[in-house]
Image: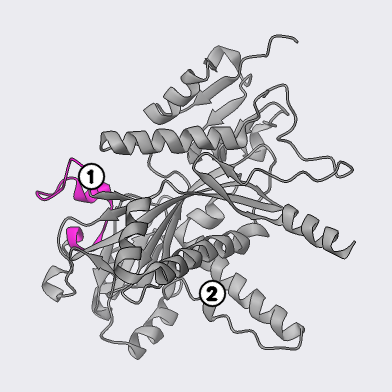
Amino acid sequence: MGIQTPVRWRSDFDKFVVVSNCERRGWLRWVPSEGEDWNFFWASVHTVKQIFNPDNGIRLGEHQIINHFPNHYELTRKDLMVKNLKRYKKEVEKEGLLAGSEVNTDWLEFLPMTFSLPADFALFAEEFKRYPHSTWIMKPTSKSQGKGIFLVNKMSTVKKWIGVQTPTIRGTIEPYVISRYIDNPLLIGGRKFDLRLYVCVTSYRPLKAYFCNKGFARFCNSKYTAEMCEMDNLEVHLTNVAINKHGKTYNEKHGNKWPLENLRLYMQGTHGHKASDQLFQSINMIIIHSLKAVQGVMVNDRHCFELYGYDIIIDDALKPWIIEVNASPSLSSTTESDRSLKCKVINDVMNLVIPDDFPESRAWANKDPDQPFRNPPQTVGSFELLIDEELEIANKREARM
């Protein structure tokens, strides 16, 4: 048996959870003098954009794997996520009508009413007239960590915002989305929280995705109130660590976070096993259908995988809502337990997407259609198989035999 070629890894940002996992495997770090001779690249979204730009002439080799799909932004840019989810719902309704039956799509109502601004201002204005006392939340489409987010409950505020926007270099106003604010969130200890959930997609066609049980809940610093006097207090309304870590009541010991397993136990204890199971089943369905919503437009490159960071909020009726999906979920650590969790997540992602004998192996590439189908692993560390369309097709074929 020959000596296996060491994996050459590359990254354009130094994060301990990535570097430590690569070094622990005995991989060799790529250096610029080696050109494009790398095997595994944990890249930023900006670098991926350059790599897949057709003008640069770069083509990934059979021995290369990278951590983003070429147009990952179809799901991770807020306005495009909204567009794709709305289109997907219409397609489901149309398919039902073509089949001769009206389809109830209430189960797809997991996105709060959302509009793009300034493009959809007229549509938003009509909706605002219907519910003049509601609160809305405005977010820039391409920023993270709570930057540029604010709440509004007056049309005059939105008009004023549009009026003072400065055009970008391209001559356009920075796009925002405005969403109906979930003003009845489920509270724990009087505080609002949301969920950060990790999902790894290894293929879009056929769709194959894994759900990580190492997610966590993120809590606000301050107790929740819907009072107007606290509308501008981001520590009441936003769970982003980047915002709350500067507050006086921020807990540096646990970083305002709860492991997902602790939240499950809490939900079972306070709402019962049946309600808790139904909640997490609904969250799984949100993830599956959000992936299906972009499946048709996503460039399915076999060299790519994606680790998404889903942000989900739960209201006081135990209904989950999708807030956004992150293409680069934070790999920075605020506590020792946070570092341990993220190291585990990245380790399991690498085990999931990279074969033991990579880079010699071609097992990760497109499977030969003439070869018999082999069941994928149901679990890889903390990741559990969420959906595998290839497996579903194989099972249906077997059932017909």
Relative image position of residue 126 (x, y in whole percent): 40, 86
Answer left or right for 121 relative to 73.
left
Relative image position of residue 3 (x, y in whole percent): 69, 9
Relative image position of residue 15 (x, y in whole percent): 39, 29
In the rendered structure, which amino acid carries the disc numbered 2? Leu
Relative image position of residue 226 (x, y in whole percent): 19, 74
Density class for disc 2 (Cα within 10 Å; few <14, some 14-19, many ≥20) is some
Answer left or right for 97 relative to 186.
right
Q: Secondary structure at mark 2?
A: helix
Near-viewer residue (245 or 383): 383
Q: Could you tell me which quadrant the N terminus lies in?
A: top right
Which quadrant holds residue 156? bottom left
Which quadrant holds residue 182? bottom left
Answer left or right for 401 relative to 355.
right
Q: Secondary structure at mark 1?
A: loop
Which quadrant holds residue 320? bottom left
Which residue corresponds to the image point at 59% horizontal and 49% vertical from the top-left?
71
Of pointers 2 and 1, the one earlier in the residue sequence: 2
In the rendered structure, which amino acid carries the disc numbered 1? Gly
Position above or below: 130 against 355 = below
Near-viewer residue (176 or 320): 320
Let me know if residue 166 appears in the view.
no
Region rendered in magenta = 234-255
Labelled disc at residue 255: 1
Near-viewer residue (164 or 197): 197
Which residue corresponds to the image point at 67% horizontal and 39% vertical from the top-left?
54
User: Is residue 249 part of the magenta span, yes or no?
Assistant: yes
Q: Which residue is mark 2?
A: 108
Which residue corresponds to the image point at 72% horizontal and 53% vertical from the top-left?
206
Position above or below: 181 against 250 = below
Let me know if residue 241 appears in the view.
yes
